[in-house]
Amino acid sequence: MVASSGTAGQNVRQMAFRRRFQALQAFMGAGFLPLLVVFLFPVLAIGLGFIAAIVIVAIAVFGALGFIFRGIDLWQAANRADQGAKAEEGVAEVLDPLATEGWEFHYGMRLDQGLGDADVVCLSPQKKAYVIDVKSHRGTVIFQDHRLHRRMGRTIYPFKKDFLQIVMKQALQVRDRKKVEFVTPLLVFTRAQLAVSQKKIRGVYVVTQESLVTKLQELG
């Protein structure tokens, strides 16, 4: 690896762009479908009968609503992707000073087996390898029932995915890709607070963005 390769957040920004484009297509479909049916209503009424034409119009309206809901979901997903990209860019800024100490970084490494991208893969001056998975969730992160959960106010929500398992699988795949003996996995929360009793959980270091550099320097 070179001192820094790839661009932090680039893959996620591209995904956000694709989702926004798809959302716009859905919104256009929501507007076009009812207009088409209304325009053709006289022909439908003559050919199929007035009642049948009304039924087709109603179906078109429900179809348009489906397009609208689809567009909203895609737009919100794009917003989340942009938020994730911003978090990755922030982590890259935090890590940048380490490059002068001999650390090397690779951003957005594509992985197989449904693991997406490795947000950051880094190599220390001592040739120790690390994979860093960046999360931008809010709230307070806790560990219970062998998984990470998020506490928002008095309510506790389990994360939809097992982040610990995912980053561990990423570390194993990066190990094979880079042909190194071991890759240490780290899970970094950029906006959430941590309320965990231990910093290493199920073999994964769980840290905040503010403590990431210190933890890497400590591990060497």
Image (cartoon, grey):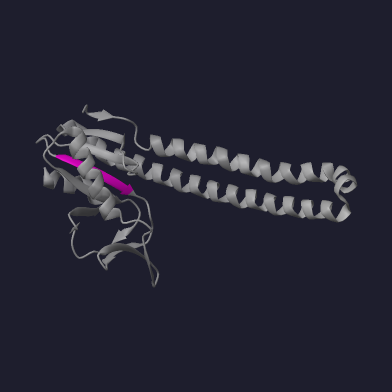
Badge count: 0
Q: Quadrant of the C terminus?
A: top left
Residue at screen point 45% across, 43% down: 82
173 to 210, vertically: above or below: above
Question: How far across and how far down the image is residue 102, in percent?
Answer: 15, 31
212 to 193, vertically: above or below: above
Can residue 208 be seen here? The reply is: no
> Which of the 4 image quadrants contains residue 123?
top left
Q: Looking at this rendering, what residue extends furthest in the left direction?
A: 126
> Which of the 4 image quadrants contains residue 194?
bottom left
Compare residues 206 and 112 and report the one nearer the observer. Answer: 112
- Could you tell whether 191 is left or right of 75 in the image? left
Q: Looking at this rendering, what residue extends furthest in the front direction?
A: 48
Question: How far across and how far down the image is residue 164, in percent?
Answer: 26, 54
Can residue 213 be seen here? The reply is: yes
- Looking at the rendering, the stretch of residues picked out in magenta corresponds to 129-134
Q: Looking at this rendering, what residue extends furthest in the bottom direction?
A: 154
Compare residues 162 and 216 and report the one nearer the observer. Answer: 162
Q: Residue 65 lies in magenta, yes or no?
A: no
Question: How far across and how far down the image is residue 53, in percent?
Answer: 83, 51
Q: Could you tell me what secondary structure mostly forms the magenta stretch?
A: strand
